[in-house]
Image (cartoon, rainbow, N blue to C red):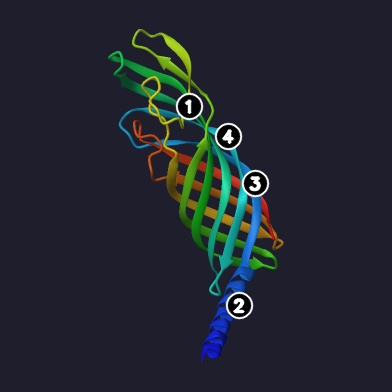
Amino acid sequence: MKQRMKLRILFVCLIVLGGVGSLLAQVKVGVQAGANVSGFASSSSMPAENSSQMGYQLGVTADYEFNNHLVLTSGLSFIRRNGKLELGQNYYPSDGSFMRFPRVETAVNYLQSPLTVGYRFHCGDGFSLTPSVGLYAAYGLGAGSCALDVKAENGEISSEGWKPLQGNREHGLNGLRRWDWGGTAVLKAIIGRHYMAEPSYSLGIMKAQTMYGLRNSTFQLSVGYRF
């Protein structure tokens, strides 16, 4: 009786492992790298003028295509987002004065993972297009000291440094949150079955900085190789 039970368990395990192996065999893994143009979108009544800056990203991707050509895609990337802002008047409670920030620069490194669903159009031999939408989640790994200009009520401007991810309030300005998440839209082209070109856009749903209602906004262009 025990022997039969062991054989049944072994049989079930083999079926499960076979199914997992078949599924993994259909998962296509790739590597990619590229450049981005990043900045901030503001949802606050406090003025924030945004100037987009160049950054970069590199990482791995994985996608699975179902029989109906629906595609589930994820991956993990290191992404550098740079930004430049001019922020409006803000109250600085330490000395009861109002200040402006005519130049605020950010350079933040994130570890980011998307999860998107799309449909693959097979346009010809070895060529396909996959538009997809979904969500991303990112964690701020770190940021060095960035430039910050502070303009006092008397018109004097002092150039300071600040660390956007330090979490503390510096010179009356809140830092950026480490966690970020939002929506993303992607168009992936696969050429010759292996080569990838992928423009995408992502917009934060979570406010990266609450004082001015700043949300990360990033256009990316990546190229890569799918194994």
Task: Verify CB contact (< 8 Å) between mark 3 and mark 4.
Answer: no
Q: Which mark is residue 54?
A: 4
Helix, strand or loop at disc 1?
Answer: loop
Tag nearer the camera, 1 or 3: 1
Q: Amino acid at mark 2?
A: Gly
- Callout 1 environment at 10 Å: few (<14), some (14 to 19), or many (20+)? many
Q: Which mark is residue 18?
A: 2
Helix, strand or loop at disc 2?
Answer: helix
Task: Verify CB contact (< 8 Å) between mark 1 and mark 3.
Answer: no
Write down the residue under mark 1: 163
Helix, strand or loop at disc 4?
Answer: strand
Task: Verify CB contact (< 8 Å) between mark 3 and mark 2.
Answer: no
Q: Amino acid at mark 3?
A: Ala
Looking at the picture, how far across and down is residue 18, in whole percent? 61, 77
Tag nearer the camera, 3 or 2: 2
Q: Amino acid at mark 4?
A: Met
**Alpha carbon separation for disc pair 1 and 3:** 26 Å
Q: Earlier in the sequence, mark 3 or mark 2?
A: 2
Q: Earlier in the sequence, mark 1 or mark 2?
A: 2
Write down the residue under mark 3: 33
Instruction: Residue lying at the far right in this picture: please name it.
Output: 192
- Residue sitting at 52 percent across and 24 percent down? 145
Q: Earlier in the sequence, mark 2 or mark 4?
A: 2
Tag nearer the camera, 1 or 4: 1
**Alpha carbon separation for disc pair 1 and 2:** 50 Å
Q: Is residue 75 above or below residue 19?
A: above
Q: Amino acid at mark 1?
A: Lys
